[in-house]
Amino acid sequence: MSDGKLMPPVGPDDHVRGAADAPITLVEYGDYECPHCGRAHPIVQTVLQQLGDEVRFVFRNFPLAEAHPHAESAAEAAESVASRRGSDAFWSMHDTIFDNQDALELDDLLQYATDAGADARGVAEDVVSGAMRPRVRADFRSGVRSGVNGTPTFFVNGRRFDGEWSDPVGFASAIRQAALAHARH
């Protein structure tokens, strides 16, 4: 068990929004079809705006495929877009998927990929062939090693955050407090 620590730490393969030298790193393990992650998405966006340069945000895939049949293909499509078009396209795809959780069939995902600037045919080939599955499963395994057992699960500066996230102001404040507490240890 991880003892509440993020394993592995944030690295070059992660999807990151924000400066590498930001004093706070917020990591989310999420599932694109999870209704709780869908509720958390706009809250996280608000928190990122509130904290500005103080925070960098990392998203790792944790598709709960038994409960959410489209979650894994959505994650694979987002990873395919990232591999083809880079970080900005990944974040565009990420946001679009969360904004359209009720439309995650392959045709929907391919339209979102096109909107993000990726070649839909290539993304379709990646999803159908499972080319991105190892990347998604690596994120999932890291979540298991880190003690993730549901989504969304957040980590602040490498430590699991078990506080309340449903209020953006309270969440931003709690993130700052958690970062300060972790810095003292």
Image: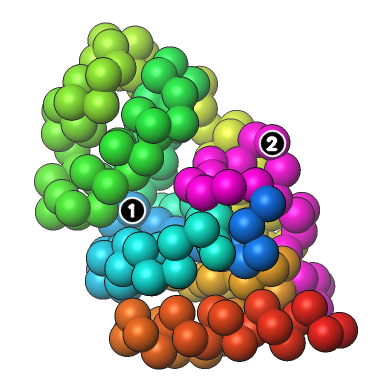
- Residue 45 located within the stretch drawn in magenta: no
- Between disc 1 and disc 2, whose residue precedes? 2
Secondary structure at badge 1 equals: loop
- The one nearer the camera, 78 or 124, is 78
- The one nearer the camera, 111 or 183, is 183
Image quadrant in which the C terminus is located: bottom right
Which residue lies under the disc numbered 2? 12
Residue 111, x across and y down, in percent: 15, 26
Residue 32, numbered circle = 1
> Total of numbered circles in the picture?
2
Image quadrant in which the N terminus is located: bottom right
Residue 23, numbered circle = none
From the viewer's perspective, is residue 117 above or below residue 136?
above
Which residue is found at the position 22% from the left and 43% from the top? 96
Q: Amino acid at mark 1?
A: Tyr
Which residue is farthest right? 185
Which residue is found at the position 61% from the left and 87% from the top? 177
Q: Amino acid at mark 2?
A: Pro
Residue 109, x across and y down, in percent: 22, 33
Question: Which stretch is magenta?
Answer: 1-20
